[in-house]
Amino acid sequence: MPAAYEQYLVPVVFRPFAKDLADRAAALRPRRVLELAAGTGALTAGLLASLPSAHVTATDLNEAMVAFGSARAPGAMWRRADAQRLPFPDGGFDLVVCQFGVMFFPDRVAAFGEVGRVLAAGGRFLFNTWGPLEKHGFEVALQAGLERAFTVDPPEFFRTVPHGYADPSLVTADLAAAGFAVEDERELTLTGRADSTTDLATGYLTGTPVRAAVEAHGDGPAVRAAVIEEMTARLGPGPVAAAMTAYVFRAAPRAGLSGFRVSRP
């Protein structure tokens, strides 16, 4: 999965937003940066380039992603870590940053509380989330292809997980519950460009958790063909371009709450 994700999806879907987030991080001039859910290192590489004098620690829950990312962006210190139980001392970072990872946290308030705990006084939390599925041209076409290929119980991963945290008011409420105040929130739409719908389909079907559903289907080639046909009908054969919408948040612990830990039952 990491290799397919890196080859087919990172340049098209994730790198444009990684550049934006790295630029925003650089404007804050942090010395110690912690990245959560770093994946294969798309944002990590951008942070290292935009903050050459900062110490960057990159983490991910998935050991395979850590191994792949550490080879791709060796300038960071890589470590496997659960965002809900960060293995770092209180107040150890000036900035915590996360690209399209918070949607995957089972308990977001607990994870945000951990972010607050490891932030130093004056520190910031910078992250983005995907907007609604309908505002991501590539993935709405992909979902239509999956629904065509799976006539019964099509995979709903993209609708429910990557695009399942697309209400900014809910994100703001979770941040507040973890002791944060939102300083900046904005909607950002960028354009992704791919050589072909075949490449895109390959990335999505082999480089994401949908891969398991395809492998369990029993006729992977037929699924792939149906998805490519539907995506091509909607996007063209390639080169293809589509708009992708995300929300970007910058938050700070409320006064007196640096090092704040959320207690969960």
Image (cartoon, rainbow, N blue to C red):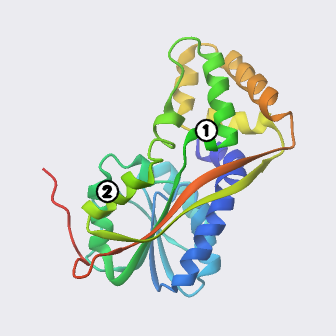
Is disc 2 placed on a helix, strand or loop? helix
Q: Position of residue 176 (x, y in %)?
A: 29, 63
Q: Marks 2 and 1, how far apart in space? A: 24 Å
| Quadrant housing residue 20 | bottom right
* Residue at (77% x, 38% y) in the render: 199
Query: Which amino acid type is shown beneath numbered disc 2?
Result: Asp
Q: Which residue is mark 2?
A: 174
* Disc 1 residue crowd, few under 14, some 14–19, many 20+, Cα 10 Å: some
* Residue at (70% x, 15% y) in the render: 222
| Horizontal side, residue 86 vs residue 229: left or right | left
Q: Which label was assigned to residue 134?
A: 1
Q: In this picture, is 44 found above or below 166? A: below
The first of marks 2 and 1 along the sequence is: 1
Tell me if I can see residue 88 in this picture.
no
Of residue 59 and residue 153, the one placed in the foreground of this image is 153
Q: Are marks 2 and 1 in contact (CB under 8 Å)?
A: no
